Image: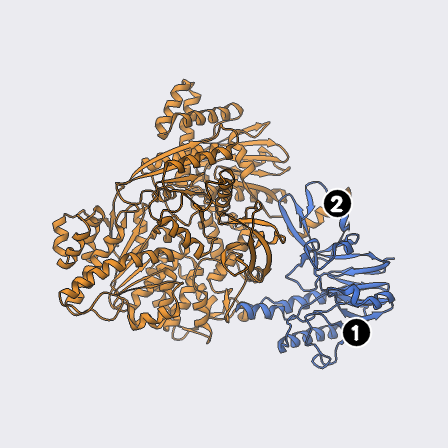
Chain colours: A blue, B orange
Amino acid sequence: MKNFNIIGPCIYLEKEKILVVGDIHCGFEEEIRRNFGGIYIGQKKENFKLMEKIIEKEKRMEKIVFLGDITHSFIYKKKEIEELNEFISLIRNKLKKVKIFAVKGNHDLFLTKKNLNNQIKLSNFFIFNENLFIHGEKDFLKIYEKEIKKSKRIFLGHFHPAIEIKENIKTEKFKCFLIGKYRGKEFFFLPSFFPFIEGSDIRKNKEIEYELVKNFRVYVTDEEFNIYDFGKLKKLEKTLPPGIEPGSP
Amino acid sequence: MEKIEFSNIREKNEIDEVLDKDLKEWFFTKFKDYSLTQKASVYEIKLKNNILISAPTGGTKTMSAFLPILDNLIKLIKEKELEEKTYVVYCSPLKALSNDIYFNLLKPIEEINTILRKKGFSKEIKIGLRTGDSSQKERAKHKEEVPNILITTPESLTILLNSSFKEYLSNIEYVVIDEIHALAENKRGVLLSLTLERLEKIAKKSFVRIGLSASVSPIKEIAEYLVGEGRDCKIAEVYLPKKFNIEVINVLNEEEINLKIIEKINKIAEENRTVLIFTNTRSATERLIKNIKENFPSKYIENIGAHHSSLSKEYRKNIEEKLRNGELKIVVSSTSLELGIDIGFIDVVVLMGSPKSVSKALQRIGRAGHRLGEIANGKFILSDYDDLVECSVIKKNIIEKKIDEIHIPKNCLDVLSQSIVGMVLEKDYNLEELYRIIKKSYCYKNLTREDFISTISYLAGDYSLELKNFYPKVYYDIEKNEIRKRGKLLKVIYLTNIGTIPDESYVKVLTKDKKEIGKIDEIFLDSLKKGDVFSLGGKSYAFLYCRGMNAYVSLSEKTPNIPNWYSEILPLSFTTAESIQKFRYLLKEKIEKNTLKEEVIEFIRNYLYTEEENAREIYNYFLNQKKVSFIPNEKELLIENYKGEKNFFIFHCVFGRRINDAFSRLLSYVLSLEKKRDIEIGVNDNGFYLASDLLNFNLIERVLSKLKKEEIKSLLEESIEKTEILKRRFRHCATRGLMILRNYKGKRKSVGKQNMSSKIMLNVVSNLTKNFPILKETRREILEDVMDIKNLEKIIEKIIKEEIKIIKKETVLPSPFGINIIFQGRSDYIKVENKINFIKRIHSLYEKL
């Protein structure tokens, strides 16, 4: 069954040669700076570095699909679009022929083909070979009912899933994938792509129905691109060694 | 070198000679004679000497300062020299206190003005109040009718220096700092010390500084803090004619301790008119009121109230009003009623649990019988053996006038950054001149040039190679060696972000008709579901819904939960801690010499000035400790190994939490470096524990023997590297240093957002350089202000020199002294293992199962 690879925060589909990328939130840093009169944190650089590392690992990709929220602000910001376009050209420099697709996320209200210099194909969803790519807004099961019916696998961003692991009194949070079957379809919840922020613990995230994901497997990834399979979410509590538990919600 | 010396007590006629006759006329219609405090200070102030007046509450301190000041203003009126300017600034740490002083001075000044009018002088003395609560209208009024005496707070005074009111401050002659001890020990005081130096620059001639303080130690240092570098200061220290009657009540052997406590309180309330109870936390305040009401439902309804800082201003004012009118039987407070707000007559003060220091105890008990000469009745009610020993020792120290030393923060680079921005907004500064002015403040007299320059480069935005990393706030002109302001927004940013008290994550609590009740912690709010009932101000409210940073509630009859606010219990003062260690030593000697039981009890009674019942409890407590383990003391540090649910190593050392926190982190850091794993720690005032399966006595001893005094600082700095405390304190320092703006373009940033950006900035800054001034300040604040590295170094030196011996014991159960350390210790861990190794290890454990 397994014809996908987890590479860092992304998923690579071997057969289709598609790289699936979670939320990148270009301009997040700009927002922080603007709001706080603070400092530059180098998000752009970190995004670039991470992408380079992924391309290094997987050069055969032919398509890249962004799962939405590629920009951060809800309003039009020139700088943000510039940053995004820079990011895209970096990818183009490395992979000349790659086709880039982006699902429109709830943050991407002002993205148009035009301001993206026609470098990216934009849409509310994409389907390639029975693989459905959507952003993952609240009622996605209803909104994309028709599309989900037609597909076997569904890929979503938006939720920034993470899991807290607790050992005695120490708690650490890790980005994670949630992958599993629901009503006969295979769902892939991707963690956010952009560094700095892990996301929120799945069990604390009020946007995800626990019922939907409780039988999904939890895969934690780290900066070195290691993958740790922690089994099914609902079993996690029972199967961890004594003294260790997933951080209590 | 400046001279700090004690003032002489003057005779009545000496003071009579220097004061204006009309002022005297007024004074003697009110008072029979000058008070002792006035005899020690009025003459000195007339001589234009700086002075620190230290006297207990009710010691006529305010009038001591204002007599010579009013005298001077009257003289100016009579000589027709009084201008429309401010001559006197009075500054107190609390808005409420400034309010009180203002209203208390209104009447005397009116009376004096009447006398002057009768004598044919047309000018009168004007007084004004300006705090964060003053309206725009009131502020504008001050420019038309300039107050000769301005009553304010440190923050409002600082803001004035950048306002158009500044020009009215050039004639300033006196600055009075009230409750100076409460300011000096935190960063508000640091800001004030710089503000005073800035005021010196505005004043035509140097002004007289008058500090008013409760009993403090070291008094000379407070005097130095008051005047800064290179200025002389007199000290008028007036000892307590105030009598204390202190009783230590324990309910240790009672069943149903909580009920017994309530019954005791009820009995005290029945015997007195008004009882003021202090608890150590806001949660405890709420819990106590809930318990009293539940046990005496018909007796205490409207005549009991809570007063703490999480209640709204209106709510608190209402309680204060009721107190003054004698409508309350019982009022329960955490800290908010400690300082001198006028609350009318209190018969007796009850302290629940230890106040942790002699000065706190004095301040709290001093609220009873406010006038001098009256006896202040104080009662400790205790339900814990460690508290019993602690409070008995505090009582002894009160009687023997052994006051704890306060700690004044020094070289704080965050407050410095803020003040420099304020200064360059006033005018352009030559770098050397700026440095000179700053070094006049006591808090910065040892500021190194390196730290000064590093702060300037942070503000100028050219820190390290990544030039564009910061929003520059000042412009540094290398050629002219000059610093100038930069950016149009700077003034607004500065004025809306001034201050040193960090935001905590509070949510306002309002009723549906928008009446504000108080605030609760964001984290507590997270745990609330619709309909959940919690207690605030002693009343129960049901949670309805949340809008933004407001939580809406309605009154409820159901049993409430008690909200938690962020930990706020003060650490045990080092002076008191040392006294406990010494007492432990003396008692151990007595017990080990096989002295007769009754003789030992007699010794405890005499030594601690305590009741026989308490002496017996203390004796039994120590005897049990000896039977099970060993009595640790000032010369012997006991380490107990107890294998319970974890492998505990309990260190018995009453050094206070500030030192134990540092000590435990230091040890566990060095130990975890050896083992490459995190070690859990738990800390309280009486000791700490380390817990890990990897620990054993040999390892601990080896590590202890290898400690070097010179390495302590750098090891501690490394140990706090990735901790929560560093993250939180970095946010505080970054907001003070204007790196994170709480207010920006008219918007207030939630603590959540502040946290997020501070976390990110901390990452960036840590990668940039270790010596970034705001980060350096964060580490300094943790090591010196939160913890107490100076005294830790002394203790470790004693361990190295074997002046403190290490005693090892293995116990089957935790010993009596150790129980609280295990169960009440605030736990944390030292992070050595990085995230990747952590998840690798956990995952491999997981796979093995």
- Residue B769 x, y percent position in the rendering: 53, 61
| Residue B760 showing in the rendered view | no
Subunit of mark 2? B
| B100 to B493, vertically: above or below | above
Chain of the residue under the numbered disc 1 shown in the image: A
Residue B90's spot in the image, x, y percent?
30, 59
Q: Quadrant of residue B763?
A: bottom right
Q: As shown in the figure, which amino acid type bears the numbered disc 1? A: Val
Mark 2–mark 1 distance (CA, rounded to whole Å): 39 Å
Query: Would you place residue B96 above or below residue A24 in this image?
Result: above
Q: Secondary structure at mark 2?
A: helix
Q: Which mark is residue A98?
A: 1
| Same chain, labels 2 and 1 | no
The foreground one among B583 and B396 is B396
Q: Kindly give the residue lying farthest to the front in the view shown.
A: B298
Q: Is residue B254 above or below residue B562?
A: above
**What residue does disc 2 label?**
B846
Q: Is residue B154 left or right of residue A79?
A: left
Where residue B629 sits in the image (x, y, percent)?
A: 52, 26
B784, B15: nearer the viewer: B15
Asked whether the viewer can see residue A10, the reply is yes
Q: Callout 1: 10 Å neighbours few (<14), some, many (20+)? A: some
In the picture, measured across the screen, residue B749 lies left or right of residue A151, that is: left
Q: Residue at x 77, y 42 (%)?
A: B848
Crowding at dot 2, Cα within 10 Å, few <14 / some 14-19 / many 20+, comes out as some
Query: In x, y percent, where is residue B186?
Result: 41, 53
Q: Amino acid at mark 2?
A: Tyr
